[in-house]
Image (cartoon, helix red, strand yellow):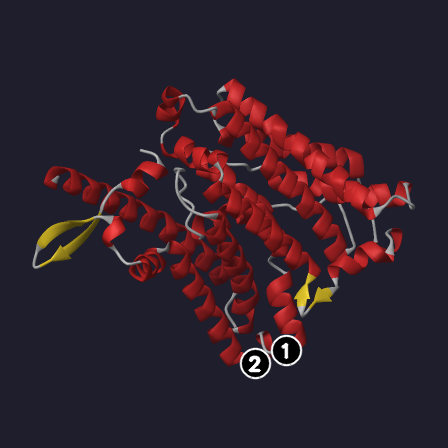
Amino acid sequence: MSRTDIEREPETEVSTGEALLVEPSRLSPTRRAVTTVLRSRELSIFLVLVAVVVLATTKNNGFLFSSDGWRNFLLNPSILLLLAVGQAVVIITRNVDLSVGSTMALTAYLTGRLFVDQPNLPIIVVILACLALGAVLGLVNGVLVAYGNVPALVITLGTLYVYRGIMLTWAGSDRINAGDMPRDFLSLGTQTVLGVPVLTIVALVVLALVGYYLHTARGGRELYAIGSDPDAAVLYGLPVRRRLLAAFVLSGALAGLAGVLYTARYGTVSSSVGSGIELQAVAAAVIGGIAIFGGSGTVWGAAIGAFLLVTINRALPSLGIEDFWQRAVVGVLILGAIVLDRVLARRQARKLAESRDHA
C-alpha cells in the first residue's frame, strides 16, 4: 500500500469502547495539526535531542551557552546532515547507499587537488565539479541497482570498497593542507550569518529543498509509493527505474557537496576522510524515523537524527561516560527506532483492517 493510500484512509477515534469513523474533513484544522504533531516520530526524536542538550548543559554551562558551544552545536552536524538527507531518500525507496563515505572522500580530495593544480579556479567551479563527480558515482550505483536487479546493499558495499580503493590509489600518502587552498574558500568553514555558520545554512537549504520536493512533487510521492510496494508500483506504471536512478544520483551529489564542506570545515584532506561515516548516515536516517523497509519517514527526521548523533558524541564525554557506553547508546537508539517502526506499522495495519471491517 502506498503512502498516499494510507493518508486517504479515514481516521479512527475510540469513544466508550467503540471505534468510530471520523472523516478527516470533519476535524478542525487546529485539531488535525495538533494530532499530526503529537503522532510524529520527528517530535519524539526532537524531544530526545532537547533532553540530551539540557542534561549536558546542566553539567557544563558552556556546552551550549557560549559562542563556541552554540557554533559547534550548529556546525558539527552539517556534513552528516547532508549525507543523512541523501541516505533518507534512498532508504525511502527500500534501498541503501553504503558508498557515501567513499564518495565524500573522493570529492574532498578532488576539492583540494583542484585548488592545488589550478590556484585561480573559481570556488563555484570547484563546487560544481565535486557535485558532478558525486552525481556520476551515484549514477553508477543507481544503474547497477535499477537495471542489474542486484540488491542495493550488495552493490553499494562493493562500490564502497571500489571508490575507497580509487581514493587510496589517487591520494596515496599525499596530504592536502590548509595552506594549499585559498583563504576565501577556507573562510566558508568559519563564517557565520547572524550567528549561524554558513555551512549549516547550506545544509539547511538543501534539507528544505529536498523535503519540499518529497512532499509536494509527484516524483517525491512516487518515491514513497515505490518504497511501500515496489511490485505494485511497477504494475501501476510508475517509472521505478528512473526514480531509483534519481534517488542514487541525489545521494551521490549530496555526498559530493559534503566532501566540499568537509574540506572547507577542516582544511586538511587525507586518504582516511569519511571512513565509517556511511554507517552514521544510515543511523541518523533510521533514528530519525525513516522506515528501514521503505515507504515512510521524512528528511526532517533524518536531519534531527543527524543532530542527535553528533550531539550525543559531543555530550556524553562531558558527562564522564566512557567511549564504550557512547557507542552503546547509539546502538540502543537504532534498535529502538527499528522496533518502534515495526510496532507502529503493525498498529497502523490493524487499524486499517478494523476500519474496513467496520465500513
Label 1 neighbourhood size at 10 Å, few (<14), some (14-19), many (20+)?
Answer: few
Q: Position of residue 294 (x, y in %)?
A: 41, 38
As drawn, is 252 to the left or to the right of 31?
Answer: right
Asked if disc 1 and disc 2 are in contact, CB closer than 8 Å, the reply is yes
User: Dot 1: what SS?
Assistant: loop
Q: Position of residue 336 (x, y in %)?
A: 36, 53
Front residue (pair 326, 146): 146
* Above-or-below relation of 73 to 301: below
Q: Residue at x 13, y 39 (%)?
A: 359
Q: Mark 2 points at which residue?
A: 61
So how many labels did they put on this image?
2
Label 2 neighbourhood size at 10 Å, few (<14), some (14-19), many (20+)?
Answer: few
Q: What amino acid is labelled 2 in the image?
A: Asn
Q: Where is residue 61 in the image (x, y as percent from the top left)?
A: 56, 81
Q: Quadrant of residue 76?
A: bottom right
Q: In which quarter of the image is residue 224?
A: top left
Q: Mark 1 points at which residue?
A: 66
Of the two numbered discs 1 and 2 on the same chain, state the one appearing first in sequence. Answer: 2
Q: Residue at x 58, y 52 (%)?
A: 81
Q: What amino acid is labelled 1 in the image?
A: Ser
* Above-or-below relation of 246 to 44: above
The alpha-carbon separation of the residues under discs 1 and 2 comes to 8 Å
